[in-house]
Amino acid sequence: MQDYCPGLLMNNNETFFGFKKVARGDKAKMVGNVFSSVASRYDLMNNVMSFGIHHLWKNQFCDLVPKAAENILDVAGGTGDIALRAIKNGPAKRKVTICDINYEMLVEGKNKAIDQGVLSGLNYIQGDAEDLPFADNSFDCYTIAFGIRNVTNIDKALLESYRVLKPGGKFLCLEFSKVESGHLAKLYDLYSFHIIPKFGGLIAGNEDAYRYLSESIRQFPDQEKFSSMIKNAGYSNVHYRNLNCGIVAIHMGYKI
C-alpha cells in the first residue's frame, strides 16, 4: 500500500480526505459527516477493530497525565474515554473539559458519563481544535487521542494547544503511527483496508466512513515527523513512545 502524506499537496487550497484530494475548506464538514454517521456505534467499533486493545493504549496514555493536574482539556474527546479515565484517576477537585467539533459525539459522551455515574467534574464544549474557545494559559494538561489526524491544519491545532496550556503544562497525544516491522505492516495494511471497512459496514452501517479512517492513518506523519511538528509549535522535551510496534504512539511535550 502506498504511503500518502500532506507534504505531497500541490497547493494550499487542497488537502487530503483519506486518499482523496479535496478543497481545504470542505474537509471539516466531510470529517464531521463521518463522525455524525457513526457516533452511536463508535465505541463498539473501537472494541471490534482493536479487539479491545484500545483500552490498554488509553490506560497507558492516561497514566502519563500529571497526577496533580487539576484542569485538563481533552480535545476531540468525543465519547469521553480519556476524560472519564482522567476524572476517575485524578484528585477530587480535577476538572476535565471535553472539546469536540462534533455534537453527536459529545451527546454520546454525556450519556456514557451518566451511565457510569460520573455526574460532576466534566464540562462539554463544542469547538474546533484549530480555533479553541478558551483563553491563553488556561489548562494544566492538553490531551488528544485519535483525533489530531482528522483536523485540516495540524500545525494550527498544535499552536492552539500550546496557547491554551499554562506554562509548565503538558501536551499528550495518542495517535496511530508508522508500524516498525515490515512484515507486520503488510498484515496491518491488509486488515486496515480490507477487513475494517467491512466491519464498519456491518456494525456501524457505513463502510466508507471506516475506509476513510483507515486511509487517514496512512496520511498521518510518522513518529519523527510529528515530533518535529510538535517542537515547531513551541514545545520542549518532546518525545514519543511506541505501543504495539508503532501501530500507535504516545507523543508528549511541555510548555516551558
Image: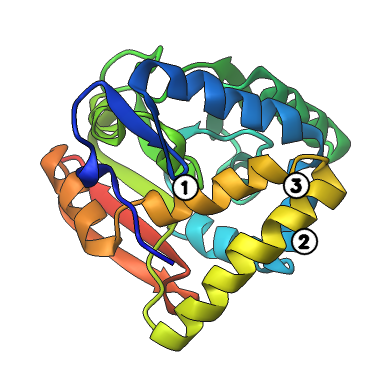
Mark 3, secondary structure of its residue: helix
Q: What residue type is labelled 3?
A: Asp
Q: Earlier in the sequence, mark 2 or mark 3?
A: 3
Residue at image coords 25%, 27%: 156
**Label 2, label 3: how many angstroms apart (C-alpha)?**
9 Å
Q: Residue 172: give x, y in percent of width and height.
A: 38, 49
Question: Seen in the image, is 52 located left or right of residue 217?
Answer: right
Which residue in the rendered view is the most extreme toward the bottom?
183
Residue at image coords 56%, 16%: 126
Mark 1, secondary structure of its residue: helix
Q: Residue 163: give x, y in percent of width and height.
A: 24, 25
Tag count: 3
Q: What residue type is labelled 2?
A: Val
Mark 1 surroundings: few (<14), some (14-19) or many (≥20) residues within 10 A: some
How are the colours assigned in the image?
rainbow
Q: Compared with residue 189, is residue 7 higher up or lower down, i.e. above or below?
A: above
Residue matched to label 3: 43
Question: Seen in the image, is 56 located left or right of residue 43?
Answer: left
Residue matched to label 1: 216
Question: Seen in the image, is 202 located left or right of residue 22?
Answer: right
Q: Residue 150: give x, y in percent of width and height.
A: 46, 37
**Label 1, label 2: how many angstroms apart (C-alpha)?**
19 Å
Residue matched to label 2: 48
Q: Which residue is nearer to you in this view: 238 or 184? A: 184
